[in-house]
Image (spheres, rainbow, N blue to C red):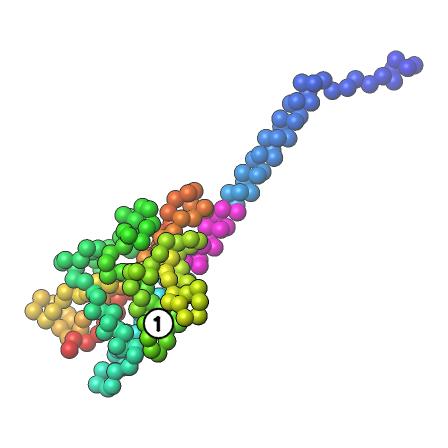
Amino acid sequence: MLKNMRQRGDTLIEVLFAVSIFAAIMVGTIVIMNQGIASAQNALEINLVRNQIDTQAELLRHLNNAKLTSIGRNGTNESAEWDNLVGQGSSKGNASYQPSAEADPYDQIESFADCKPDQLPDNAFFLNPKPSSSGDDNYVQRKAKIVEANVFAQVQPGETASALPVANMLWIQPVASTRDSSSNTLLPLTNYYDFHIRACWDSPGAGGGVMKLGTIVRLYVPKQ
């Protein structure tokens, strides 16, 4: 009777096989979880950077509207900022960075493989969302205030209340219209400017690669 009650245990090979299957399942689960977290972080960063780009576009439209409103009237700080801004606009024929109005905005930053500030064109700038009415804390901030992206591309306030803001690899490239009444009859009284808003940053969710986003805002002003 005792012989019939004796049970056979698992062999060492069976135990190792079961442990191997369990380990494989755990490793696969962890890999899938990491990929999901990376994808979620990548999507969040893209959404945040798009919001930053939209903010820059709205600030450009605000300055353009201020310029249009001031025509025939006394100028304002905003209209003066617009004049300062388009004074940096480069001609398509001699620009060091030459996107055209028809170009794919994403192709224009393919050369920024390392996403470094020293790769930016000389007339790159960004707009300060919270300018003051006096001093250097105005809308247009030049290339010197564009630094590497420590998290994602964005405009950050200064470390102190009196410090100027910095841009983490978020910038605008102005390109001036070359059209005039002699070469174009469609817009004989109007100039336009293409503002290429660019952003690049290192994203863990991009597989260790550089994320790049961009858009183009075209704004018009009457010829003077």
Q: Residue at x 35, y 66 (%)?
A: 56
Q: Is residue 47 magenta?
A: yes
Indicate the quadrant where residue 206 lies. top left
Q: Is residue 144 above or below residue 86?
A: above
The percent position of residue 118, horizontal first and vertical second, equals 28, 52
Indicate the quadrant where residue 146 lies. bottom left
Residue in front for this viewpoint, 151 or 69: 151
The percent position of residue 67, horizontal first and vertical second, equals 26, 78
Q: Is residue 58 left or right of residue 176?
A: right
> Which segment is the magenta one?
37-49
Q: Which residue position holds label 1? A: 137
Indicate the quadrant where residue 170 lies. bottom left
Q: Is residue 101 left or right of residue 135?
A: left
Q: Secondary structure at mark 1?
A: loop
Mark 1 neighbour class, 10 Å CA radius: few under 14, some 14 to 19, many 20 or more: some
Q: Residue at x 72, y 17 (%)?
A: 11
* Helix, strand or loop for the magenta stretch, by majority: helix
- Tell me the quadrant of the picture where the N terminus can be found: top right
- Is residue 52 at least partly visible in the picture? no
Q: Is residue 202 magenta?
A: no
Extreme bottom residue here?
73
Q: Residue at x 87, y 15 (%)?
A: 4
- Tell me the quadrant of the picture where the C terminus can be found: bottom left
Q: Is residue 132 left or right of residue 4?
A: left
The percent position of residue 7, horizontal first and vertical second, equals 82, 18
The type of residue carrying mark 1 is: Asp
